Image: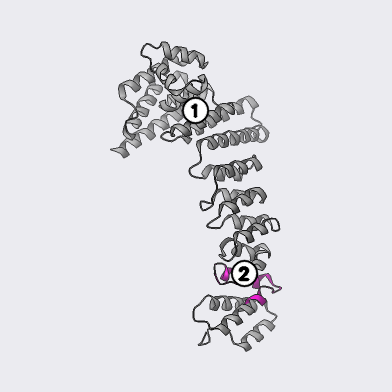
Amino acid sequence: MTGGAFLSSKDVEKLLADPSPSARADTAEKVARAYAGVGLSDAERALAQAIIAALARDAETLVRRTLAEHLRDNPDLPPAVARRMARDVAEVAVPILQFSPVLSDSDLIELLAAVSPRHQAAIAGRSRVSAGLAEALVLQAAEPAVAVLMGNAGASVGTPLLEQALDRFPDSRAVGEALARRPGLPPKFAARLVGQVSAALREMLVERYRVPPVQAAEMMMQVRERALLGILGAGADPTGLAELLAELQRLGQLDSGLVLRALAGGDLVFFEAALAQLARIPLGNAQKLIHDPGRLGLRALWQRCRLPAGYLDMAAAVIEMARGLQQGVSAADRAFFVEAVTQRMLTDFHALWDAAELRWLSRRQSRAQAAQRMAA
């Protein structure tokens, strides 16, 4: 490069001989900036690469770190230099590992077993992580890196990898929180995650705060159930809902409390599918029994599912409201139905719910009102 923007041979000799780390760091920055520019001759490019290779072996971390920071996203960085810097101390390696387009998936996978958790986390935080690299991280990397991967929207992570991550780190708060924030979780996996995190929270309450185990279990049950109902949002597709309910039953979490709270919150679709799952009958059969105008079908199904008899009148009232309001025609209709049901719970059936449940019902009613305003 002309005009003095690049180093001359004398500059190179002088600066590399200078014992000052800051002077050599300045050299690293100047060379890296020039190398990223345009218009270099072949001779200048070869000289720049030779200087970069020498600076990458400098004894001072400051020099190598400066070089890495200014070359981290340069696509022309010599691959051998990139691989050397990727194995350096974390201060040097992290910018290269996280941003360099020179490193291939095979380079990164090979590095995983030889570097620290901080190095691994930098790899997991790349803007794009392929399915193969993500699998290697889940199987080999330490907990912090797996947590970063689970929180990376650019990582190709399917449901099997989500499950493997949770299997490896079942008690990790960082991994659990990252998974919980990940958009589009399959309902079946989300159910498992909520149950597992609730168990960990229960243990923490008992051990750290000396909350009696029975009280902690009751608290976590309510937290879990409200979270599970929140997973569905406006409702899941039939296949996803069936998978969720089957998983809940397998985990022993499809109990009367969850089913009744779903109905009290106006989620009639969940309620119908849950009773079909509990009774082990086709959904269509359960719907016919539930909506039998004479209540004989509902009563028989209620008894088969072993639901509390004291809530049968509540269920019948909600089902009657569904017939009158034609719930489910549109988003606005569904919101109107949820508002009507929660209002009924808060007035006519408030004695069935404790204070926490009443607060949850009130919040659900407010969200339904807001949804109606949005639809209007």
Measured as percent of width and height from the top left, residue 182 is found at 51, 45
Instruction: Name the residue located 57 percent from the left edge and 30 percent from the top edge.
Output: 220
Mark pair 2, 1: CA separation:
59 Å
Measured as percent of width and height from the top left, residue 142 is found at 67, 50
Instruction: Name the residue located 47 percent from the left edge and 33 percent from the top edge.
Output: 239
The question of residue 269 being in magenta is answered with no
SS for dot 2: helix
Name the residue tied to disc 1.
Answer: 356
| Amino acid carrying mark 2 in the image | Pro
Residue span colored magenta: 52-81
Measured as percent of width and height from the top left, residue 35 is found at 55, 77
Taking 73 as reference, is 28 above or below it?
below
Alpha-carbon neighbours of circle 2 within 10 Å: few (<14), some, or many (≥20)? some
Q: Can residue 354 be seen in this view?
A: no
Alpha-carbon neighbours of circle 1 within 10 Å: few (<14), some, or many (≥20)? few
Q: In the rendered image, which quarter is residue 350 located in? A: top left
Q: Is residue 359 left or right of residue 26?
A: left
| Amino acid carrying mark 1 in the image | Ala
- Mark 2 in CB contact with mark 1 (< 8 angstroms): no
Q: In the rendered image, which quarter is residue 8 located in? A: bottom right
The question of residue 58 being in magenta is answered with yes
SS for dot 1: helix
Measured as percent of width and height from the top left, residue 315 is found at 42, 18
Name the residue tied to disc 2.
Answer: 79
Q: Can residue 116 be seen in this view?
A: yes
Foreground of the two, 372 or 193: 193
